[in-house]
Image: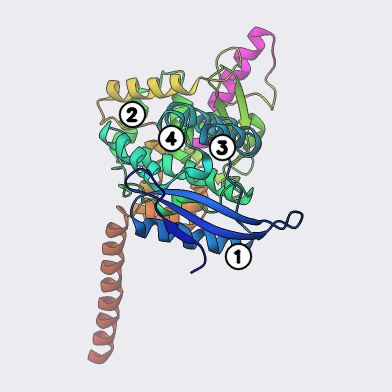
Amino acid sequence: MRGSIFKQKNQAPGSWTVVIPLGRDPETGKRKQRWTTVKGSKHDAEKVLRELLTSNDQGTLTKPSKVTVTAYLDRWLSEYAKPNLSPRSFERYRDLVRQHFTSSFGKVALTQLKPEHLQKHYTSCLEAGLNPMTVRYHHAVIHKALDTALKWGLVSRNVADAVEPPPKHRHEMETWDDWEIVRFLKATEDSPYFALFHTVLYTGLRRSEALGLQWQDIDFVFCQLSVRRGLHHLKDGSYVFTEPKSEKSRRTIALSPVALLVFRDHRQRQEQDGLLAGKPLQETNLVFSQPDGKPLRPNTITRAWQSAAKKASVKPIRFHDARHSHASMLLKGGVHPKVVQERLGHSSIEMTLDIYSHVVPGIQEAAARRFDDLINHQVVNETSEQKR
């Protein structure tokens, strides 16, 4: 094998020096070499040697750099994350980098970042009590950041590929049955948020999608609403509209007669309030807003939901679980999963079936019983024919 592995005089125990040839300098004619220190066993050093030689042969070998992980991530946030992510997602990425990555392995040179650095970080987070799904999110973000570094030619490989994040544990989904939904809505009829609560339970909208609805999105003739944007509240107190999460999220949802009636009543109240205030209702006004037309704070809605559930004496579920309740009710009622996927705005039917796999057994049993009924019906018909 080209290159060499050896221990230098007075080199720290458990460290090896890896040297590979880089040819001769075209100007001076002197031989060029790449020296690298590897901590670990000789087997680890041999692996690094093979990786360096392969990168050199493929022309992807990067020059050693003293740029730290923190310095790179700051650049990545400003040059990649901010232009490509929604403002809310950018905030989450930025906070994750500053609160966790910087203190954990931020001082390490980007080119010296090793799988063990990430593995140690994941282990420390789990020992500190972080949810495994949160640690998986850490892995997803740093993996994306290192993928970008690879594309920019700053590293020769994505070390996150060699690290296993914690296993995925599905969140135990809590949903309401029909009687719980009826009881909850009955208890919130006089709440200023009744129309909003009714809408998310009857349509499966995400919170941001519901808060971003404008009256121009409600079609009273064809009984449907269009999801065209989401509304997010940033940490600096500002509100921003964002594009739907994906092309599938930009969708049209059919409204039931009951849901349409709730929208009509809600609009009439807004029109009356607008006339009293001297501000006629505009089609671009938010469907769900404060009395002065300003956006509702998402956290305020969540707290109001929790308080209303307690008042209604139904089991507490998250606001987002209204969406799950809507989907579960439809699937249990025999609605085709493809229709449920389209209403929820999932990217694929596989995603819908994966999320609501807890409902599938009941659907399968109903299908089996239905098949029995069809066969038995045919047997009865043939027996009747023979008797004749």
Hey, which quadrant is residue 254 in on the image? top right
| Residue shown at 54% from the left, 25% from the top | 265
| Residue shown at 25% from the left, 91% from the top | 386
Hey, which quadrant is residue 350 in on the image? bottom left
Q: CA distance from mark 1 to mark 2?
A: 66 Å
First-in-chain label (2 vs 4): 4
Q: Is residue 333 above or below residue 202?
A: below
Q: Residues within 10 Å of mark 3 (few under 14, many from 20)?
A: few
165 or 149, nearer to the observer: 149
The C terminus: image quadrant: bottom left
Q: Amino acid at mark 3?
A: Lys
Q: Nearer the viewer, mark 2 or mark 3?
A: 3
Question: Is there any visible trace of residue 299 in the rendered image?
Answer: yes
Residue range (magenta): 259-280
354 or 169, nearer to the observer: 169
Q: Which mark is residue 57?
A: 1
Q: CA distance from mark 2 to mark 4?
A: 48 Å
Q: CA distance from mark 4 to mark 1?
A: 30 Å
Instruction: Give the SS element for disc 1.
Output: helix
Instruction: Give the SS element for disc 3.
Output: loop
Residue beneath disc 2 = 184
Q: Residues within 10 Å of mark 2 (few under 14, many from 20)?
A: many
Q: Amino acid at mark 1?
A: Asp
Question: Is there any visible trace of residue 261 in the rendered image?
Answer: no
